[in-house]
Image: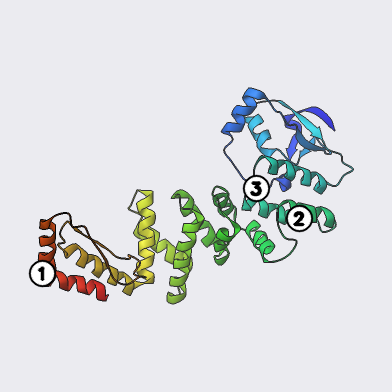
Amino acid sequence: MKIKRIAIKEIQPDFFFHFTTPRDLSDLIASLDQGGLMTPLPVLPAASGYRLIGGFSRLAAASHLQWTHLHCRLLETERPVSEHLVHIVKSHMLSRPLNPVEQARLVAMTDLLVAEAALRRLLLADLALPQHGPRLEAYRRLAGWPQPVLDYLSRTDISIKHAAVFDLLAPDEQIFMAQWADDNGVRPVELGRIITLCREISRRESAPVVTVFQAAVAASSFIENRQQHVAAVKKTLTQRRFPALSAQRDAMLADERRLQMPRSVTLAWDRTLERPGVTLEVDLDSKQALLDLQKWLGDAPQISRLNRMIER
């Protein structure tokens, strides 16, 4: 292994090998500033300067610190670049697990290693991925999604299963929904439920998915609080998807507000209306509490409202 001090201006990143996703460089910059570069950057001699095939974040951090030179490890040009890539991937995985976006990018790279079947098998085995099958296809599709979608997914803790909800969308729909979710702190699992609602409405009304979603976002655009805005979008979509159910829920809420229950009684019911009926919890701690309960149970209008809630 040969180590050489090289001017940063001579190092040209080969972004074909840039499989890692963007991250905050502040910690890395502080680490380099205090302790220097502990691991040399892997480079290959090129016709002009050197090709960087790993350590892109370290190069960016060093440039931020306005360093002029870096220690680099000169890779053997006699070996296939893919063999060097396998070693780089292994070193990355020792520091942290790769997220699905990074795995997807590597899967896309392995498709170019057809002539190097042994290396391809080794790389997929290191990623704990099968050599063939639906799961591998899911990663291939993920690798082809628009960059804003990949940036959003890379900033969240996801599985390939959760990310697959974007398979159901066109590229423009993917970008719009990913950017909205990113701006409002919506995680992929929650966004998946929203996308499912939009698709159900789209099928029923023969309207584009993105049009359905944009209408719900526009209806809640006046709400500045992000959490409340997201809740309002979901409520708008739910009411549009299940209008009869929404009306039934509103009627239940109206009856509940009119119930003048004594303090000893607590009422609960399933807001999703998936479980029928209501639950009454009674806490009698005095004779007066018992009298209040008897009086309430004898109030015909109150019991009528309660009965309507049960029948719904």
| Placement of the N terminus among the 4 image quadrants | top right
Residue type pointed to by label 3: Leu
Q: Residue at x 87, y 41 (%)?
A: 77
Question: Do callouts 2 and 1 mark residues in contact (Cβ within 8 Å)?
Answer: no
Q: Earlier in the sequence, mark 2 or mark 1?
A: 2
Q: Which mark is in front, 2 or 1?
A: 1
Inspect this view and state whether residue 4 appears: yes
Circle number at residue 98: 3
Is 129 rendered above or below residue 59?
Answer: below
- Per the image, the residue denoted by label 1 is 299
Q: Earlier in the sequence, mark 3 or mark 1?
A: 3
Inspect this view and state whether residue 14 appears: no
Q: Where is residue 114? Give x, y as percent.
A: 82, 59
Tell me how far mark 3 sits from mark 1, CA to CA.
64 Å
Q: Residue at x 84, y 55 (%)?
A: 118
Q: Where is residue 49? Give x, y as percent.
A: 80, 34
Q: Residue at x 77, y 31 (%)?
A: 72
Count every numbered label the image shows and give the total: 3
Crowd band around label 3 with a 10 angstrom C-alpha radius: few (<14), some (14–19), many (20+):
some
Residue type pointed to by label 1: Asp
- Per the image, the residue denoted by label 2 is 110
- Quadrant of res 213: bottom left
Q: Which mark is in front, 3 or 1?
A: 1
- Quadrant of res 162: bottom right
Q: Where is residue 273? Give x, y as percent.
A: 34, 69
Element class at badge 1: loop
Residue type pointed to by label 2: Thr
Crowd band around label 1 with a 10 angstrom C-alpha radius: few (<14), some (14–19), many (20+):
few
The residue most toward the top is 34
Q: Earlier in the sequence, mark 2 or mark 3?
A: 3
